[in-house]
Amino acid sequence: MDEFELIATLTAGLPRPDFVRVGLGDDAAVVEVSAPQVVACTDMVVEGRHFRRAWSSAEDIGHRVAAANLADIVAMGAMPRALLVSIAIPAETETGWAADLIDGIQAEAEIVGAAVVGGDTNSTEGPIVVCATALGDLQGRSAIQRGGARPGDQVALVGRQGWAAAGLTVLSRGFRSPRLLVEALRRPEVPYEAGIRAAESGATAMIDVSDGLLADLGHIATASGVAIDLHTDLLPVDEPLRDTAIAFTMDPLKWVLTGGEDHSLAATFPADAQLPEGFRRIGVVTSGEPTVTVDGAEQRGARGWVHFGP
């Protein structure tokens, strides 16, 4: 297929919700929002760096690409509305693979009522690259930023944490089970609705945990000029993590503290606030140099995913 035949194939049948005033096929899309502020983010995945086709189907990869962007939108307290998707693929790639990729992206978007409204395609002699940009509607609320945490706030978490990292360990060692953990890496289960609940419940800061709990809470600590201390007895070490850690002679807390790709949401709330449904307290915000400690102690070694590392 040439470029335009490929685009027509990939976009055939994609829905166009009422809030999309101008959709696919024009120079740009027009998306209706209820307030003058639009939340926007973008995320890119590169074959060999972020995914392997031997480990994940095209549809799996589509889910992950969409989830990475949609999770950033809800972490700001906004409702996702639209996705723009650009892909660079080798000319010999089967059209069906690309079509499955778009199906996965749209299926993830439909979970929150969002739609794919445009994008771009190109050929490459290198690895496959997929980049998506998401747009969100704050619906009259103020954005929840990273810089609002204050000493005395409680730190809370919602969603799976460490499952995708455990799944990556499983695959890296040549296994395909526990399947539950492998599937958590392939298709994250993002607590989308929790972002809105957090915003409505007075969250002072919030972040999508994509690179690791220590690393991402470190962004909140730095932006807010505070210290954060996590308590190990409050951290969620779920049964699949415990069982797999025993099999691999590992500490499951490593996955919980440094694992990304689950796209859980970490947020801070005033000390006297009642946590919204699904959130669990995992620590406290204190005064001091911006850092994240565990039971009062600094953590050595990797704190999460390093994008420009080896």
Image (tube, rainbow, N blue to C red):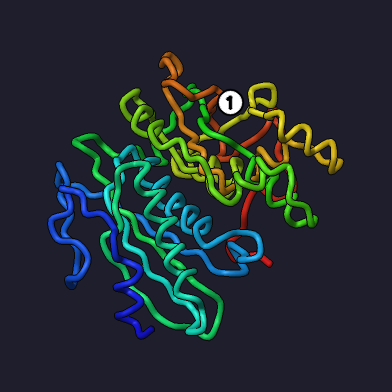
Q: Residue at x 40, y 62 (%)?
A: 102
Depth check: give the residue in front, 266 or 128.
128
Q: How many numbered dots are placed on residues in this image?
A: 1
Q: Residue at x 58, y 46 (%)?
A: 215
Q: Is residue 81 above or below residue 77?
A: below
Q: Residue at x 27, y 48 (%)?
A: 81
Q: Looking at the rendering, which quadrant does residue 131 occupy?
A: bottom left
Q: Looking at the rendering, which quadrant does residue 281 occupy?
A: top right
Q: Is residue 138 above or below residue 101?
A: above
Q: Is residue 21 above or below residue 249?
A: below
Q: Amino acid at mark 1?
A: Ile
Depth check: give the residue in front, 144 or 97.
97
Q: Looking at the rendering, which quadrant does residue 23 occupy?
A: bottom left
Q: Quadrant of the N terminus?
A: bottom left
Q: Is residue 204 above or below residue 116?
A: above
Q: Position of residue 51 (x, y in %)?
A: 59, 62
Q: Position of residue 33 (x, y in %)?
A: 17, 46
Task: For mark 1, give the secondary structure.
Answer: strand
Q: Residue at x 50, y 23 (%)?
A: 154
Q: Is residue 269 left or right of residue 232?
A: left
Q: Quadrant of the C terminus?
A: bottom right
Q: Position of residue 208 (x, y in %)?
A: 47, 43
Q: Is residue 140 left or right of residue 148?
A: left
Q: Is residue 210 left or right of residue 2?
A: right
Q: Is residue 268 left or right of residue 76?
A: right
CA neighbours of label 1 inside 10 A, class few (<14), some (14 to 19), many (20+): some
Residue position marked by numbered label 1 in the rendering: 282
Depth check: give the residue in front, 130 or 149.
130
